[in-house]
Amino acid sequence: MTITDSIIIDAPLKKIWQTFTDLTCWTNWNTVIRNVDSKENAIAHGCSIRCSFRPFFFPIRVKIRIEQVVPYKSVTWSARKKGLTARHEFLFQLHNDAVMVISRETFSGVLTKAYGVFLPKKKIAHLKKTFLKDLKQASEASKETSAESM
């Protein structure tokens, strides 16, 4: 099962990248991935992030491993949990005077066969859309704050 979504963010790529990769500020803008804990302050190749998200009524704690980082272009991470593997790609593409952020998450494993029960596609898609909206709001708000201080 693969879930893909995208959003156009009206902010400089550098600001969006900084917002996305700076783990120390995720609690300020990210309403989907909570309780972020990492030895690193920023997303970097090989680092691990412990966090939780809530696709059901209770939070699910996961360990994310950053597989690949291409600065200002893409981040790929993966997580495994009880018979389920998720691989998540984020792509950052210039789009006119803005940036398109594409989120593509692919699920595999035993639990994907019963995805309606254990992996509700609509709920996962909603969380993905919310994450992208949160990133957009944080990146664009930061842009406005920077413009006002000039």
Image: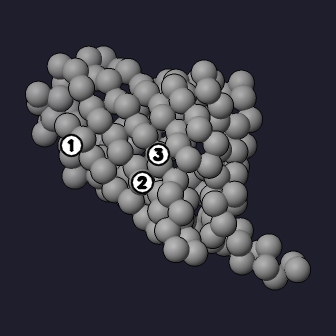
Q: Nearer the viewer, mark 2 or mark 1?
A: 2
The residue identified by callout 1 is 120
Disc 1: CA contacts within 10 A as few (<14), some (14-19) or many (>=20): some
Q: 149 left or right of 102?
A: right
Query: Which residue appears at 64% of the width and 42% of the height?
Result: 71
Which image quarter is the C terminus in? bottom right
Q: Is residue 14 visible?
A: yes
Q: Position of residue 67 (x, y in %)?
A: 51, 25
Q: Residue at (53%, 43%) from the top-left corner?
A: 74
Q: Say whether disc 3 or disc 2 marks the residue closer to the N-terminus.
A: 3
Q: Is residue 3 left or right of residue 37?
A: left
* Tag 3–tag 2 contact (CB < 8 Å): yes
Give me the residue at 71% from left, 68% from top.
Answer: 142
Mark 2 / mark 1, whichever is N-terminal: 2
Assess disc 3: are there few (<14), some (14-19) or many (≥20) residues with their C-alpha within 10 Å of its C-alpha.
many
Task: Identify the disc placed on residue 102.
Answer: 2
